[in-house]
Image (cartoon, rainbow, N blue to C red):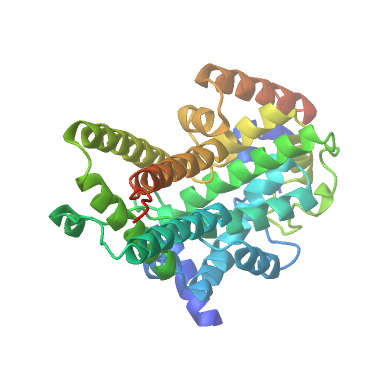
Amino acid sequence: MEDPKHETLDELLAKLPHDVALPRNLWPGVARGIKRRPRIMGSFAFAASAAMVCLVGALLWAVLREKPAERSDSATNSQTLGFDEPRDPAYLAARTELEKSFRERLAVLDPQTRAKIEASLALVRRAHEEIRQALADQPANPVLERLLQSTWHDEFDLYDHVVRGTQPTMTRS
Amino acid sequence: MGTVQLRQCAQVIDSGTEPVHVIAAAVNGDVGAFERLYALFAPNVYGLCLRLTGQREAAEDCTQDCFVAAWRALGRFEQRSRFSTWLQRIAIHTVLARRRGLRFRNEVAEPSAGMPDLADPGADAPPLDVERAIAALPERARHVLVLVGIYGYSHSEAADTLGVAEGTCKAQLHRARSLLTAALGLEE
């Protein structure tokens, strides 16, 4: 081997292998971590559960009153959001249902209120998409991860507020 | 995973492309495919973590955490960057996050603990002194040297990933090189 003192620093650094053999197999720990922390984060699952409870409550209320809430054709136009974090079918179904309910309630609001809500929703979605794109370049960046969760919850909160805020008021017969 | 299959994947990586089918399967939730990716990329991630942390145990923890974080973030992986590059960025964030946590709890260990096992004693292996000298560098200087000097990041990429200004990155590299040159007794 060449005497290191006669080599330049760059030559020495270039010789360093990028791969280093692991002293032990770390896969069992990774596998445990994967099971403990599934793709859908705990908070997302919680939000999904909360949304489902909210949706069921709203539907139950409509059934008990024996007077279905006004519906609009826009409800059928609800589109999938295209977010790529949660993949669990049950979660996605719950989210779709919640958005459908939100669209139904939104359709019966006055145009001015509806415009404000839609503008807020667009803002949240744009922020979420920009953060998601930033995360593609900076995966696992903790600040971006938190911001992504935050915008995700913001969207949920918006749906929730609209659905709750437009529930039919209780009346005595 | 079979030896032949793993060898085929390794050949694909060596030839400059990545095992896109395995990556796609992992993105779709196939844990077996993800285990294959682990087998292929873990040595690279571990090497990076080992040099960034300067500690073997910390590097093992970070490598493990990196793959768990990668699994969680796989849904957001886009083909814009190479999978190995994407994984390295997760590893760097994992090391930095762990470092912040340890500093908060005042549990920072001495660098270079466990380093004697780093270099393979083969004929082409770099002198162990180089690895020891890198591990003994001040943390920020070491991070920049590892990313720019060893793993080929540009100053811009390293600065962006480490969350520092590009000028700071250049200054830290200069500092690291000066310290290493002196520590290894190299000619300026």
Occupied quadrant, residue B183: top right
Residue at the far left in the pictured view: A73
Spot occupied by residue B178 in the image (x, y as percentages of width and height): 69, 21
Q: Quadrant of residue A142?
A: top right
Q: Residue at x 41, y 53 (%)?
A: B77
Residue positioned 62% across, 68% down in the render: A35
- Residue A86 visible to the viewer: no
**Depth check: A142 or B131 in front?**
A142
Q: Determine whether, in the image, residue B179 is placed left or right of residue A128.
A: right
Q: Is residue A134 above or below residue A17?
A: above
Q: Residue at x 46, y 44 (%)?
A: A153
> Where is residue A123 shown, x and y percent of the image?
31, 33
Percent position of residue B127, x then y: 75, 45
User: Outermost residue toward the front?
Assistant: A173
Which one is in front, A160 or B124? A160
Left or right: A132 as drawn, with respect to B110: left
Is B160 in front, or is A10? Answer: B160
Q: Quadrant of the C terminus of chain A?
A: bottom left
